[in-house]
Amino acid sequence: MNSLSVYFSRRPRLFGFSNLVGILTAVLFATALTTHLQAQTPPKLKSVTPLDGATGVSVSTPLVFEFDQVMNITFPIIPTVPGFLVGNFQTDPSTPGQQMTGDWSEDGRTLTLTPQLPVPLNITLSWTLNPPGGQSIFQIKSAAGISLATVSGTYSTGQTVQPPTLSSVTPLANATAVPVNTTVIFKFNQPMKKQTAPGGNPPTIPGAVSWTGVEAAKFTYTWSADGRQLACDYSGGFPLSTSVGWVLNPTAAPTQLESLTGQVLPADTFSGNFNTAATIPCDPDPLPDTWGNYTLFKISTYDQTSSADPTPNSDGLPFLFSTFVSSPTLGPVVTAASITRPNGTQTNLSSFGVFQFSQSFNTQAALDAAYPAGNYSLRFSQTGLPERVISINVPAEVPPIPKISNFASTQAWNAAQDFTLQWNVFTGAADQDYLSLFLSDSEGEVIFQAPDACVPRELPVSATSIVIPASTLAPNQTYTGQIIFGNTFYSSTNTVPQMSGFGSVQRITVFTLQTADVGGPVEPATLSAVQLLPNGNLRFALSGEVGHRYGIQRATALNASTWPEVGAVTLDSTGSGTFEDTQAPTVLPFFYRAVAK
């Protein structure tokens, strides 16, 4: 037989015996220690924890028995082993009882039986003290030697099922100026049953989601894959300047929102409202905000600091390969992603809210060597769905490097006047390619961009210039410009449900733009180098404040009361300019002057 060590003390822990010899040895030893006591009233069980019939009890909760009198704590607790021994403690199922340790309190009135292994989850455990059929010598007795009458009880293990609650809502309660195309999203703390029509059938049947201020019938509802989010879209957009109220599970609704476990969301508990904007905002992106996306980019960044050709960007590594995958807001969630190059090398994307991978290089040649033209496989998994494999072919062609062709003029820009920004031709551009321009202030806020669907402002790939309207920029400020030539080699909105895909080779030139200081007096212009041209026109030179615009006026006398304006000149980065009068009078004399505008 296996060896057995038996411990005795004032608080013996003698549960879990593995053989009868040890049990009987302990019994005989304890019996020898028992002295003859005077007969007393039989002991009774005063209380038990967990309560008889309790549910949702933790699997590690001990059984605690409190007696009405002092008990014989020197006698061991002996579990019943079905078919072998009837002890003084018994459970059904029997195994959990055989894995409990008995512990008496110092005053001899409380017995604690602690599970040494977790009791199985979601079972009903019956327990009995001094079960029928046991020998008197084994029974639990009072200090006076009077046996406890058989007593039983039950409890059920498991986790108490809590009703669901609303974790958050978008828009927030009492939000103002909410865009009319906003999707209302309710998030719950546990998976919910995906009702197909939580809005009911208004107006005759109240829905589990009740609305005020709008027409309930115009809502469509979409559950996330995990059942924790409910998206509510209002057909045609919310009305302007409207207070929209909502209540979940109004008492009158015959169908209620409930969890997968059947627990109903508390009625009339979760409610709120928001106010829509007074004007319709511009949303240049036609895709829903709840969509996810996947992308692949090769990006080369250059700096232009003069009229010379741009050079590779000096801020870090200017040549970049990048790919990322983001989940749709309502799922299914992306759980893993990887990119496989044309040579078969596979790299896993790291997860930082989205799955992404990027690598930078010092030269275009190094970028192209590591990530050459060819077929790339972007793979990603979504919860409950087969792996997606997106084949993306990256071409060898790259766009030209953008270059500002009138760079000198951008360093003395008169912000009070219209200004034309010019650049080189985007050679080889196709219809799916794109040309973009951004001007940002010192805080990084975009002040001007093209194209811009919200203005609207177009910028076709064939464009080589654009007019920056007067007063778009502030005087005496430095702005950062970016001009982008992009070759699009992949675009899809239907390969993966609720996800868009995009692939592009980009070349970006970064430049600075300086506006002139026109806050103080403008430097007067000086006229010089007068010439009478062979065609009869008069031409002269001007010098004055850099970037400033001067009106050219002409009169037949120095003391003339009126000086009509016959033209205007904007001085270059050196403060110089020329004017040619194509309609100079044939009768002398006549006089010119330049007036700052």
Image (tube, grey):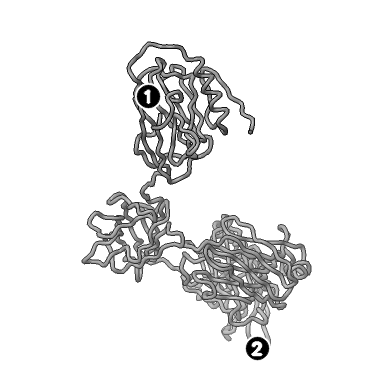
- Seen from the viewer's position, the closer of residues 7 and 478 is 7
Q: Say which residue appears at 51% left-offset and 16% top-offset.
A: 32
- SS class of the residue under badge 1? loop
Q: Report if residue 128 is visible in the image.
A: yes
Q: Amino acid under label 2?
A: Asn
Residue at mark 2: 535
Q: Is residue 449 left or right of residue 49?
A: right
Q: Say which residue appears at 67% left-offset and 70% top-offset.
A: 507
Q: CA distance from mark 1 to mark 2?
A: 132 Å
Q: Report if residue 528 is visible in the image.
A: no
Q: Is residue 384 left or right of residue 344?
A: left
- Seen from the viewer's position, the closer of residues 592 and 177 is 177
The outermost residue toward the bottom is 535
Q: Is residue 159 above or below residue 374?
A: above
Q: Is residue 585 above or below residue 551?
A: below
Q: Is residue 117 left or right of residue 195?
A: right
Q: Is residue 478 above or below residue 549?
A: above
Q: Say which residue appears at 24% left-offset and 62% top-offset.
A: 206
- SS class of the residue under badge 2? loop
In front: label 1 or label 2: 1
The x, y position of residue 316, in whole percent, is: 72, 57
Q: Is residue 245 left or right of residue 529?
A: left
- Seen from the viewer's position, the closer of residues 157 and 81 is 81
Q: Quadrant of residue 245?
A: bottom left
The x, y position of residue 300, in whole percent, is: 70, 67
Q: Amino acid under label 1?
A: Leu
Q: Is residue 126 above or below residue 299?
A: above
Residue 148 disc label: 1
- Seen from the viewer's position, the closer of residues 69 and 503 is 69
Q: Quadrant of residue 406?
A: bottom right
Residue 455 disc label: none
Q: Earlier in the sequence, mark 1 or mark 2?
A: 1
